[in-house]
Image (cartoon, rainbow, N blue to C red):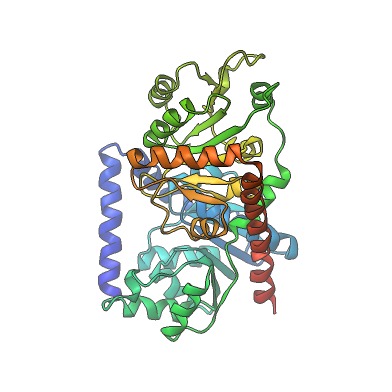
Amino acid sequence: MRIIYTIGIYLYALGIRMAALFGHAKARQMVEGWKHWPEQVAKLSHERPTAWFHAASLGEFEQARPVLEAYRLRHPESQVLVTFFSPSGYEVRKNYAQADAVCYLPMDTPRNVRRFLDAVHPDMVFFVKYEFWYNYLNALRNRGTMTYIFSAIFRPEQYFFQWYGGWFLRQIGFSFQHLFVQNEESLQLLKSHGINHCSIAGDTRFDRVHQIAQAAEKDAVAERFLAGHEGPVLVAGSTWPPDEELLAETLAQQPTLKAIIAPHMIGEEHLQQIERTFPGSARYSRFPSHTGDTRILIIDNIGLLSKLYRYATVAYIGGGFGVGIHNILEAVTFGKPVFFGPNYRKFQEAHDIIARGGGWSVGPTVAAARPTFGARLAELLDNPSALQRATEACRQYMQQNLGSTDKILNTIEK
């Protein structure tokens, strides 16, 4: 089975290289990044212990950050290597100050694995959530390297729980000193397959978004936009066109509601489309020093969304009419009730916040969502006690789920 897996990796790498040749931007970045990992890891000293953190992309990196940064504080003698699989992580965090070196992870072929581990000599390795690179895991096990995974989620439909996945599941069981999972379902699923060196530590994203919220500064443009406005505010984050279509119709029914919309894509073509969808809106980068009659502020740059949720009365999280919702915790950590589309099944926090009365899915389609979203939003905005209950549900949910970082590090350090 390992031979078949490795052949698959070679074919996957070939596919990425072919895509790069035909101009695919992300593929080209990956191929270029693979060339330069040796010069990055050369920054590491073999005289100091090395902790290696691997994240697939930016989202997983944000899950890793609380553990990484707490580890550095507890172990100042260690150096830290961060690797990424995806350009969405590397290109944003390649200059991350808390890491001694940052690079792309070479593809999981035996030769690459041997070269990489010989160059890095990691003393401790942390994978995040879904990262199972079997040649790396096998080599780390053979070298006796302490290897962990945290914020992991396991579901019965995953391939390593199918009839053909036994080999993959055994590698998971053999390779990690401990598996830190997010929920009871994951824990029981692993134990039912004989993997007992696991425990519930929760999701480190709670610690991360809490850190961000605590450190968030006020935003001068948002405050100018909202100056003198005493009515409710909706902040919509990471929206896609179906979300924006729904929001436009709903906002038309709520004349006292102001909105801040942060689209997932901020290319000029999409921004112009949003301006057509929301006539009279203003872009963040062009916003004047007075509010005028503008009801809708469009965020046209990156990195602001997490601090803008503080201004919300309620929040709408995009992506749910596509492959899946974006991060709801950035809003929930400020105690903001959240709405989102139907595709949230793989997001435990969405199920949790619905069960607690702090969030709602708006409907199976945009057409079906129009009356549902409008009615539920009106119910919250017109009923202060209902809004307060939803707000308190979000705050309690966050408070109950903080502390994952300490659970992980305390277990490792015993």
Single out the residue that lies furthest toward the bottom. Answer: 194
- Closer-to-camera residue (327/335): 335
Q: Is residue 299 above or below residue 12?
A: above
Quadrant (top left/top right/bottom left/bottom right) for the C terminus: bottom right
- Residue for point 47% across, 28% down: 253
Quadrant (top left/top right/bottom left/bottom right) for the N terminus: bottom left
- Residue for point 30% across, 62% down: 9
- Closer-to-camera residue (203/3): 203
Q: Quick check: can you spot residue 201? A: yes
Q: Is residue 47 above or below residue 206?
A: below
- Closer-to-camera residue (111/326): 326
Q: Residue 156 in the image: x percent, y percent?
A: 37, 72
- Closer-to-camera residue (35/9): 9
Q: Is residue 26 above or below residue 101?
A: above
Q: Is residue 39 above or below residue 1?
A: above
Q: Residue 342 in the image: x percent, y percent?
A: 39, 49
Is 120 displayed left or right of 217 in the figure? left
Q: Residue 274 in the image: x percent, y percent?
A: 42, 25
Quadrant hosting residue 410? bottom right
Is 252 displayed left or right of 214 in the figure? left
Is 244 displayed left or right of 391 in the figure? left
Q: Quick check: can you spot residue 122? A: no
